[in-house]
Image: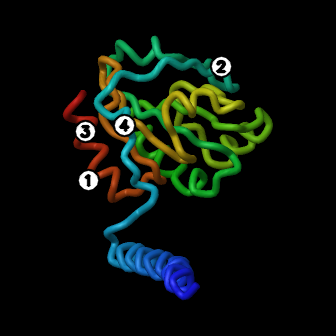
């Protein structure tokens, strides 16, 4: 009888041990985030270094849509940007996309899980930086590309290989330190 009591004590302490370990892990994540060593949006996309996946997006007026084949033989690298009208960070990065367009960087947009009227309002308010524009209302292209949210951007080289991915809004620092050097390298 006493032996059963001895075996129960460690079992009763297991939830407490799990809570302590979980708490230590959570505190470590908070410390990393505070120090800038952890950003959940920088999860690496396994498609970098590989060909553009099979996909097709239909016309999203004023765009004409595009597919994998359109990204295989390019005159220069293209930035593919997944965005949505309902995405607050997408509105925030819109001026930077317009600046990149003005500097000659071709940007092709994929409007994710959106409606035509909402897209029209987005483009009217924030401008249209997209040389090509397609709609992905059901998220099928997003699944093919492996995105986890919007905005996300991919740099495609002239032969259709994904050379860079950002799972966050573009910022001037990221554009100057990462994107523009790669556009030049693969141009």
Quadrant of the image for the N terminus? bottom right
Along the polypeptide, which appears first: circle 1 or circle 4? 4
Location of mark 4 (residue): 46
Secondary element at image label 3: helix
Quadrant of the image for the C terminus? top left
Up the image or down, 109 lies above or below 84; here it is above
Q: What distance separates the C-alpha of mark 3 from that of mark 2? A: 28 Å
Residue 181 horizontal/vertical position (percent): 23, 43
Number of the label disc, if any, that sits on residue 177 = 1
Secondary element at image label 2: strand
Residue 107 horizontal/vertical position (percent): 46, 33
Location of mark 3 (residue): 182
Along the polypeptide, which appears first: circle 4 or circle 2? 4
Outermost right residue: 117
Outermost left residue: 185
* Residue at (42% x, 18% y) in the render: 71
Residues at badges 3 and 2 in contact (C-beta under 8 Å)?
Answer: no
* Mark 3 Cα-neighbour bin, 10 Å: few <14, some 14–19, many ≥20: some
Up the image or down, 17 lies above or below 119; here it is below
* Residue at (33% x, 59% y) in the render: 173
- Closest to the camera, between mark 4 and mark 2, is 4
* Residue at (67% x, 20% y) in the render: 59
Q: What distance separates the C-alpha of mark 1 from that of mark 4? A: 21 Å
Number of the label disc, if any, that sits on residue 58 = 2
Residues at badges 1 and 4 in contact (C-beta under 8 Å)?
Answer: no
Q: What distance separates the C-alpha of mark 3 from that of mark 4? A: 18 Å
Q: What distance separates the C-alpha of mark 2 from that of mark 1? A: 33 Å
Q: What distance separates the C-alpha of mark 1 from that of mark 3? A: 9 Å
């Amino acid at each position: 009888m006493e032996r059963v009591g001895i075996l129960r004590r460690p079992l009763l302490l297991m939830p407490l041990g799990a809570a302590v370990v979980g708490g230590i892990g959570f505190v470590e994540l908070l410390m990393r985030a505070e120090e800038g060593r952890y950003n959940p949006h920088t999860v690496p996309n396994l498609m970098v270094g590989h060909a553009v996946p099979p996909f097709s997006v239909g016309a999203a007026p004023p765009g004409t849509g595009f597919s994998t084949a359109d990204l295989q033989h390019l005159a220069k690298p293209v930035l593919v940007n997944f965005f949505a009208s309902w995405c607050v960070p997408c509105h925030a990065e819109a001026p930077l996309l317009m600046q990149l367009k003005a500097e000659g960087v071709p940007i092709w947009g994929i409007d994710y899980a959106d409606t035509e009227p909402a897209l029209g309002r987005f483009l009217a308010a924030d401008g249209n930086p997209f040389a090509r524009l397609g709609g992905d209302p059901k998220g099928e292209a997003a699944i093919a590309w492996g995105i986890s949210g919007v905005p996300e951007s991919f740099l495609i080289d002239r032969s259709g290989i994904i050379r860079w991915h950002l799972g966050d809004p573009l910022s001037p620092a990221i554009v100057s330190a990462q994107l523009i050097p790669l556009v030049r390298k693969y141009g």
